[in-house]
Image (cartoon, rainbow, N blue to C red):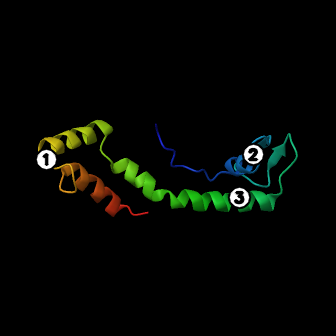
Amino acid sequence: MTEEVYVGKSIVHAIKAIDSNAGCVVKNEDIDDIEWSTTPIAKADIQAKMAELSTADDNLDYARKRKAEYPSIEEQLDLLYKDMLADKGDKTGEWFKAVKKIKDDNPK
C-alpha cells in the first residue's frame, strides 16, 4: 500500500476538488483561460481552493522527506530480525534508532 503524499496545486486539481464532475480545459495553467463544458466555477472559488490545496501540500513536506529517507521494507524487516536475534526488540534496537532518526530529522 502506497500512501499518497502529493495533494496537487494546479488549477485542474482545484477545480476537481470543488466538483469532481466539472468539465473544462485549462490552457497554459491560466485561470483566465478556462473553457468549460459544464457549469463554470467562480474564479475566486478556484483561487481559494488552490490556496487550500497548496497549504495542504506544503504541510505534507515532512512526509515526502521521510518517505525518501526510509530504508526499503525488506531492509527494515532485516533490521527488525537482527534486533530480535540480539534481544533488542525495543528502543535499543537498530531499526528503532534508524526510524527515530528519520522522524527526528523531519518532524511534522
Q: Which residue is mark 2?
A: 26
Q: Which residue is mark 1?
A: 87
Bin the neighbour count of mark 3 within 10 Å (Cα to Cα): few under 14, some 14-19, many 20 and up: many
Rendered image quadrant of residue 75 = top left
In the image, is residue 62 above or below residue 76? below
Asked whether disc 2 touches disc 3, contact meaning CB atoms under 8 Å apart, the reply is no
Bin the neighbour count of mark 2 within 10 Å (Cα to Cα): few under 14, some 14-19, many 20 and up: some
The residue mark sitting in front, 2 or 3, is 3
Residue at 33% over, 50% down: 69
Type of the residue with mark 3? Lys
Residue at 72% over, 62% down: 48
The residue mark sitting in front, 1 or 2, is 1
Bin the neighbour count of mark 1 within 10 Å (Cα to Cα): few under 14, some 14-19, many 20 and up: few
Q: Quadrant of the C terminus?
A: bottom left
User: Which of disc 2 and disc 1 is earlier in sequence?
Assistant: 2
Q: How far is mark 1 from mark 3, CA to CA?
A: 51 Å
Q: In the figure, is residue 102 to the left or right of 8?
A: left
* Image location (x, y in percent) of residue 18: 75, 51
Secondary structure of the residue carrying tag 3 is helix
Q: How far is mark 1 from mark 2, CA to CA?
A: 59 Å
Q: Which residue is mark 3?
A: 49
Residue at 13% over, 47% down: 87
Type of the residue with mark 2? Val
